[in-house]
Amino acid sequence: MRKLVQGNEAVFHAAVASGASYYAGYPISPSTEILNIASAYAAAHHHTFRFLQAEDEIASANAVIGASLAGAKAFTATSGPGFSLMQEAIGYAQKVGVPSVFVDVQRVGPATGMPTMPGQGDIMQVRFGSSGDYTPIAFYPNGVEEAFRVTVDAFNAAEESRSPVVLLSDTFVAHLNEVVDLDELAADLRIVPRDMPPLARHVAGFPRFFAGVLMYESGPSAGEPATADADEYLRQYYDAKHRHLEIAGRYPLFEHGWNRGAEVLVVCYGIVSRVAAPLAADYALFRPIRIHPVLDDELRDVAAGYREVVIIEANDGQYADMVELALRREVKRVPLMGGRISIEAIREGLARVLAGGPSEPPVPDAPTERRAPSPLGIG
Amino acid sequence: MATSIALDGVGGQGVRVIAGVLGNLLARMGKQVTVLFDYDSSVRGSMSDAFVIFDDEPIANPVVEDADILLKLANRGHLRIQGRKVVTDLGLASPGDEQIPFAALGSQHFGKELFGNMIALGRLLRLAAVDYDERSIRESLPRRFVDENLAAIRFGFDLTDEEIAHLASEAPPSRFEMNAAASAPAPVRGLDAAYDTATATPTGGETG
C-alpha cells in the first residue's frame, strides 16, 4: 500500500527485507526511530528478530558483531557521537571480517553539537575513524525509496565483502516522510544469503579466526600469532582490500543529471542534493550514492566535460578533498555549516565561490540581543 | 503545481500532528507528498517546525523556505521562512497576516485549547484548496477523539472570511500574551540565572 513512510522507517524495513534478524543499539537523535521500530518489531516477531538496547554504543556495536559471528545478519543505527564510540568495534569487524551494517544518521558535531540539526560531518570518520588501514564501503541515499533500496545494497555488500558496511544518512533524510509502497519495494529483491558458517559450528576446511591480533590463518602455523610477520600482514591486508574493492565495484551507484550541458558541475549528496534541486536548470549534478570507496573513475569521466566543479556539502570540505584527489584538479567548495541546509545558503555560496571568493561564508557579528531562554532548558 | 506549507510552532502544540494528519490525508488522496520535521533539542517549548509539500509530480526539494501557506502557532521558529499567505494564532500576526484565535476557539467550541490545532488544520485545508473526503481524513487521524477532531477540522474548513474578520476584532487578549508572563522560566533554576546576577535568586541548599 502506498503511504507516507519516514526515512528511518524505510531503513528498518529494508533491513528486515534483507534478512536482518538482530538489532542492537543505543538511542540518539536523529537515529532513534530505527531503534524504536526495531524494539516494537522484535516484540511482535520474537522468533525471527531479536533486539537489544545496550548500555551504550560500544556495547551495541560489539553485540552486533557477536550476533553476526553467531550467524545473524545484524545491524545498528546511531549518529556521529555514537558512531565515534563504535569505531574500535568497527576496526575489529574490519580486521576479522564481520558482515554487518552500521547506520550513521549524521547531525551537526563535533560532540553533542546541534543534536537535531542536519549535518554531513562524518564522511571522513567513516573512511578513517578506526585505527590502521582498511577499505570501508559506505552508501548514502537522498530519499525514502532510495533509503530502502540502498539499505538492501548495504546488507548485500556486507555479506559479499564480509565487512562492516556503513549506511550514511542525515537528520533530514532520516526524518523525511515520502509516499512509497513498502510491499512493492520488498518484492523481487536480490538478497545475498549468509554463506559464512556460524562461529559455534565447526566446518571442515573452513577454520575461523576472530582475534583482533594478527594470526596465521593458513599453513602449518595456522592459529599462531603472526604479530611480527609483515608478509602475513600483507597477505591479509591486500586480500581484504582487493575483496572490498571488487565488491564495491558491483555497486557503482551515482546520479549524473540536472542540466548535463551546463558549464559547472555541482557535486552533492544526501539531503543537500534534494535542497539544491532548484539549481537544476543551470547546473549539472554528480551525486555519489556510494561514498566509499570514492567513485574515482566515474568522477573523472563525468567531471572532464565541465569548466568548474563545485562541491556543496554540510561539512567543511570533507568530500571535496577526496574529489580533488581523484580529479587531480582544484575544485570549489560551498560548506553548509551549523545545520543551515537551505537553497538560500546554497545560492549565496555558489555565487561567492564562482566569483572567485572564499569558501568560508560571511560570519555574522556576535549577538547583542538576548534570546528568550528555553522554558525547560536543553533536553 | 506544487503547494508548500510551513508550520511554525513550539514543542507540545501539535505541529507534528497537524503535519502528519495533513500528509497522510494527501497521500491517501493519491498525491505525492513530503513531510519533513525540523525541531530544536528541547522536548517542549522550543522550536518545532514542519514542512508539507504536495503535488501530482514527484517532489525534489522537501525543505520549505518560501511557503505558499505559513501557519504560525508560535514565534520561536525559523525567521527565514517566508509565507505568501500567513495564518497565525492571536498575538503573532504582522500586518497583512490572517489572524484566527485557534486556541481560544478550541477551548470555546470543543472544550480544549488543543483542538485549536485541528481547527488550524481545517483552515489550512481550505487555503490549500484540498477537497478532502471524510473517510480519508478519518483514517488519517489519531485513534482517540476522532469525532471531535473531525468536527474541529470541519469548523476550521468552514470558517468564512467575514467570520475570521469578526473573530479577530472581538478576540480576547492572546493566550500568548497572557502566558508570556506566567510561563517565563523561574530564575532560580533557569540556565541563565547562574550568569545573570541581576535576576538570580540565592540558591542556598541546592548545591551538590
Image (cartoon, rainbow, N blue to C red):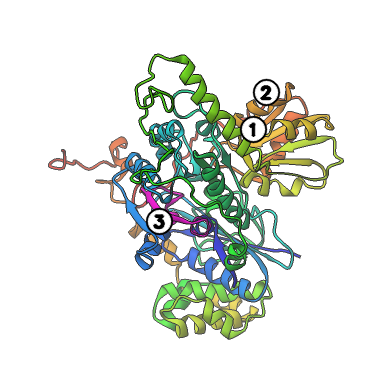
Numbered badge on residue A37: none
Residue A365, x across and y down, in percent: 55, 31
> What is the chain letter for disc 3?
B
Distance (Cα) linking label 2 and label 3: 46 Å
Q: Amino acid at mark 2?
A: Leu
Subunit bearing disc 2: A
Mark 1 residue crowding within 10 angstroms, few (<14) / some (14–19) / many (20+): many
The residue tagged 1 is: A294
- The answer to whether residue A83 is left or right of residue A165 is left
Q: Position of residue A151 (x, y in %)?
A: 55, 51
Residue A133, given in percent of the width and then of the height, sits at: 50, 24
Provide the residue designation for mark 2. A325
Which image quadrant for residue B175? bottom left
Instruction: Please indicate, yes or no, whether residue A263 appears anywhere in the rendered image.
Output: yes
**Where are the magenta residues, as a range?**
A13-34
Is disc 1 on the same chain as disc 2? yes
Q: Is residue B39 magenta?
A: no
**Callout 3 amino acid:** Gly
Select label 2 or label 3 by which is in front.
Answer: 2
The earlier-in-sequence mark between 2 and 1 is 1
Q: Are marks 2 and 1 in contact (CB under 8 Å)?
A: yes
- Give the secondary structure at mark 3: loop
In magenta segment, residue A16: yes
